[in-house]
Structure formats: structure tokens, C-alpha cells
Amino acid sequence: MTPSDERKEKAPGVCSNCGELLTVRITEDGTIQPISPHNICSCENPSLRVIEEDDVFDDAEEDFH
Ligand SMILES: [Zn+2]
């Protein structure tokens, strides 16, 4: 019963340009945007992408074995 057109998902993101970590939101059409314009790196053209769990735990995974 929630209005789906207002629904946005927060996700951990990273600028693949400079590696800056930031929180992003994913809009309905799949666009990745920073939560806040102040919460973004200083790249002229930030290349934002969502961090997948595999990305985060890729290196640490060895510790679990
Ligand atoms: Zn950047």
C-alpha cells in the first residue's frame, strides 16, 4: 500500500573514478544518484555505481575460510 512512485532505495555506492565511498539512492528507472549533493566526491563527472556485496567482501572472504 505504499506509493511506489516515491519509492527510492538507499545503497552503499562508490565513485569508480576516484574510489570515494558514498551513499546513493536508486531511482525507479535505475538511475544512481547521491543522497545529497554534499555527500559526493569532488569529481567533475562522478562515475557512481552501487557496491555489490561481492565487491565489499571479495577480499575479506578469504578470512572466513
Ligand atoms: Zn569521484
Image (cartoon, grey):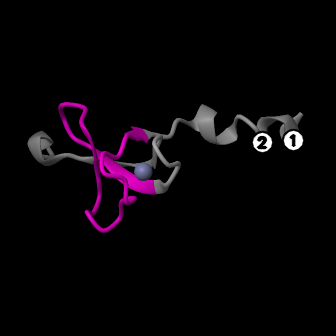
Three-letter code for the amino acid on which mark 2 is drawn: Ala
Relative to 6, 40 lies left or right: right
User: 21 and 61: which one is in front?
Assistant: 21
Residue topped by disc 1? 63
Asked whether, in this view, residue 31 is left or right of residue 3, the answer is right
Secondary structure that dominates the magenta span:
loop
- 58 to the left or right of 44: right
Dividing the image into 4 quarters, which one contains the C terminus? Answer: top right
Give the class, few, some or many, for how many residues have Cα within 10 Å of label 1's Cα (few <14, many ≥20): few
| Residue 55 is one of the magenta-drawn residues | no
Circle 2 residue: 60
Please tell me whether mark 1 sits on a helix, a strand or a loop: helix
User: Tag 1: residue type?
Assistant: Asp
Relative vertical location of residue 23 with respect to residue 53 in this rendering, above or below: below
What's the residue at 50%, 40% (across, down)?
51
Q: Which residues are magenta?
A: 22-49
